[in-house]
Amino acid sequence: MTERERARGVFQRPFDAIASVVVPVVADAVDPDDLVDRIDVNALIDRIDVDAVLDRIDVNALVVRLDLDALLDRVDLDAVLHRVDLDRLVARLDVDAIVDRVDVERIVARLDLDAVVDQVDVQRVIDRVDLDAVVDQVDVQRVIDRVDLDAVVDRVDVQRVIDRVDLDAVVDRVDVDRVVARVDVDAIAASLDIDAIVAQSTKGVFGRFIDLLRRQVVGIDEVSMRAVSGLLRRDYESLPAGPPLAVGHDLPATAPHTMSGRYAGPVSRVGALTLDLFVISSTFTLLIAGVSYLVNVLFGGSLDLTESSGWIAGVVLLIYGFSYFWMSQAITGRTLSQGLFGLKVVRSDGSPLSPGAAAIRTVVLPFSFLVLGLGALMALVDRRRRALQDVVAGSAVVYDWGDRPAALPAPLTRFLDRRDTTS
């Protein structure tokens, strides 16, 4: 110990002795409440440099020395909370500022969400929630308007959803009888127009069957005309395909292989004419039989044109046949049999046949078969496949299947395509 410290100790002892005697007496004589009342606490706080005081306090050391458990045990929290004006406290809080200073991402990152969820009794939460009240407060339309349904649907794995659905269980829960009872079957049947559907389907089946037969005949036409062109040493590809207005322009005969609007071949034409003659003879026979029956019923007599006046029957048959061909071709451009074979009679440029041209064609038709049928055989050698009646009337016969394109059989089409590719 230095001399200076030794001297300080000598002088310190008397003062300590005096303080130990005086301080208790003074403390007993002083009224602390009176002393506190006389102190101007605000003035005292104003004179204290709080920042300097806090700077001199070792907070960590203070916290270490404090027994927080004992301190909390001595605090009456209920009394403290009772004396706190929570509304006033909340009103003075700047919640936005507090939220702005909170690092939500950091809090979420430190939270063990799985542990939190595990501790939540979801069923208990649901039981305590008034779902009806919640739903009543939700503006569903506003929620739907804010949802991007396309984005939601794009993120849904529909196949996975279907795989997870027990369709048998769903079907078992459906009351089919109730569903059927609520369906207005009569209204559905009326809106469907069943008669039109049946008629359309029947027409479709019949049309496909007729088209199948037509393709075979058109295929024979195509093969026979190519054979004739070969015998005549004629370049088949250079021949005109059909009337300009029927095919759009003067296409070569092989490009493309669709047959709509093209000049018809001999097999189709002979087949249609043969069927027309059968139709004329059979219907004429039925007509004569019907007239004879009416004469017998009404007048008690008989009418037999074949026995009494054969020439009259011949004249009537010619008139009937002329009317059949002329009226059919003048009105629709085809007879019943030509329509069945997919043929149509047009003018040489492809425009509709006029009644006058139809009459001339019908009159000249029988003369095509005179002199060994040379007039009809002209269709084999003419570049536009015209017979005598077509040359005189300025007409032509083309393929026309209505709203469906005329076509060759598939094997023949493939053969022609391969040949064209090779050439």
Image (tube, rainbow, N blue to C red):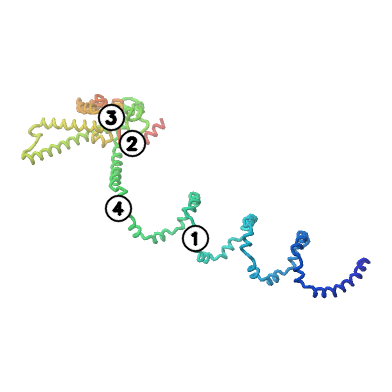
Identify the residue position indicated by label 1 in the image: 134
Local secondary structure at mark 3:
loop
For label 4, count other residues whose C-alpha is less than 10 Å away and answer few (under 14), some (14-19) or many (20+).
few
Local secondary structure at mark 1:
helix
Measure the alpha-carbon separation of dots 4 and 1.
Answer: 43 Å
The amino acid at mark 1 is: Val
Residue at horizontal 12%, vertical 38%? 291
In the image, which is nearer the foreground, mark 2 or mark 3?
3
The amino acid at mark 2 is: Pro
Q: Where is residue 60 in the image (x, y as percent from the top left)?
A: 74, 63
Q: Position of residue 419 (x, y in %)?
A: 39, 32
Q: Earlier in the sequence, mark 3 or mark 1?
A: 1
Residue 352, numbered circle: 3
Decide: is 127 above or below 350: below
Q: Quadrant of residue 378?
A: top left
For label 3, count other residues whose C-alpha is less than 10 Å away and answer few (under 14), some (14-19) or many (20+).
some
In the image, which is nearer the foreground, mark 2 or mark 4?
4
Q: Position of residue 305 (x, y in %)?
A: 10, 34
In the image, which is nearer the foreground, mark 3 or mark 4?
4
Q: Quadrant of residue 405?
A: top left
